[in-house]
Amino acid sequence: MSLLRHLPSRRSRLAVAVVVPLAAVSALTAVVTPASAAVECSVAHAAPARWQGDSNSTPCTEGVSTTTTTAPRQAAGSLPSSFRWSSSGILISPKPDATHPNVAVKDPSVVYHNGRYHVFASTYTDGYNLMYTSFADWSQASSATHHYLDRTAIGGGYKAAPQVFYFAPQRLWYLIYQTGSNASYSTNRDIANPQGWSAPKNFYADGMPKIIQDNIGDGYWVDFWNICDSAKCYLFSSDDNGHLYRSETSLSQFPNGFTNTVIAMQDADRYRLFEAANLYKIRGSGQYLLIHEAIGSDGRRWFRSWTAPAITGPWTALADTEDNPFARANNVTFPDGAWTRDISHGEVVRTNVDQTMEISPCNLRYLYQGLDPGADGEYNRLPWRLGLLTQTNSTC
């Protein structure tokens, strides 16, 4: 099977032909960048035998404050150094209608609020837009109604890769998504009202920051993720070219004022740090968890992971190799049959819904996108579906 079908970004609007070597030869090292590209840190990792070269890290020294939440306490626990998961079958598939003949549903964001799961995701027909669905139990997910957000003030045109959270200081729900040339957001007083979303506004008044322009190469600016502590909010993004970026603003200024964009992490092999970053506060530990999607030596999608004492790092490898991944086909069992070999863009089911992005280290669940292993063809039209991983080796 050709590896090429998995290489372009899931949301690229043009076909891209890239060749991936069957055995990568570069480890995670500093990338040569222009003087204007302030590289904050590189992250060392435990390299599997086939990787060559030296690990190279520059520690991050910036500190941040922490925050607390009022979510109910759970049993104390910690993240393991390796993960095991069990996957559901397909839970959410496209629901085409006369004006939305969708072939894929992907890039989910999920919160549990007022007794219901609220899921936002990308859809694809001949372009990308967004959908919303809600249900009380995962057993109801496949039958739940899909609400297409191009019928709201969000409007039509290119919208993809949502992230949803409640910004407590303003008592507003935020939906963040990419619009091709910027990171955008809409707000809503009631997450359960799909018609309540406001028209899009951009985070970056001047468009793509220069440091990203200087380093993106032939990649794409994708997958925006916001997380806040008690003083600042941080907006992360990836570029399909081995870089994770971070911008910041004060909590009081959010959603305005994002600046000071830096490279938060980089890898000389673009496919080992490709896209779809999630960053969470780990309840009760004073630590943060970062996971980031990679493209494996077999061309399949999987996730690496790191921990840090602050949103700004420094990041220490947790489970970040193909032999010891955060989530990959080789550490997932499929009781109902292996319907996918890709574990791709998704989100942990959080313990709270607000901007602190807190998760419990106990019994993790991860909503993800996968697809039929035999599917082939143009990347954007691949038949992505959503399934749920449940951790089977919790330390709690």
Image (cartoon, rainbow, N blue to C red):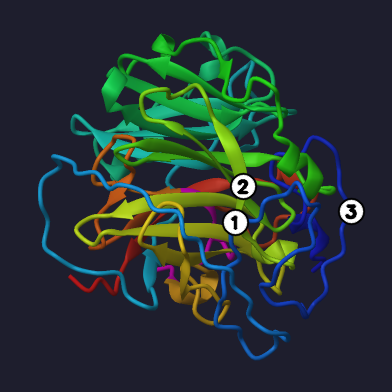
Q: Which quadrant does the C terminus fall into? A: bottom left
Q: Which residue is mark 1?
A: 40
Specify few, some or many for label 3: CA neighbours under 10 Å numbering under 14, 14-19, or 20 or more.
Answer: few
Magenta range = 333-346
The residue depicted at 79 percent of the width and 56 percent of the height is: 33
The residue depicted at 19 percent of the width and 44 percent of the height is: 68
The residue depicted at 70 percent of the width and 26 percent of the height is: 207
Please say if 174 is above or below 194. Answer: below
Specify few, some or many for label 1: CA neighbours under 10 Å numbering under 14, 14-19, or 20 or more.
Answer: many
Nearest the eye: 358 or 299: 358
Q: Which residue is mark 3?
A: 17
- Sooner in the amino-acid sequence: mark 3 or mark 2: 3
Q: Can you give x and y, in whole percent of width and height, for residue 352 in the image?
A: 24, 41
Membership of 318 in magenta stretch: no
Query: Distance between the Cα atoms at labels 3 and 2?
Result: 28 Å
Q: Which quadrant does the N terminus fall into? A: bottom right
Please say if 250 is above or below 22. Answer: above
Of badges 3 and 1, the one in the foreground is 1
Picture quarter containing residue 301? bottom right
Numbered label tally = 3
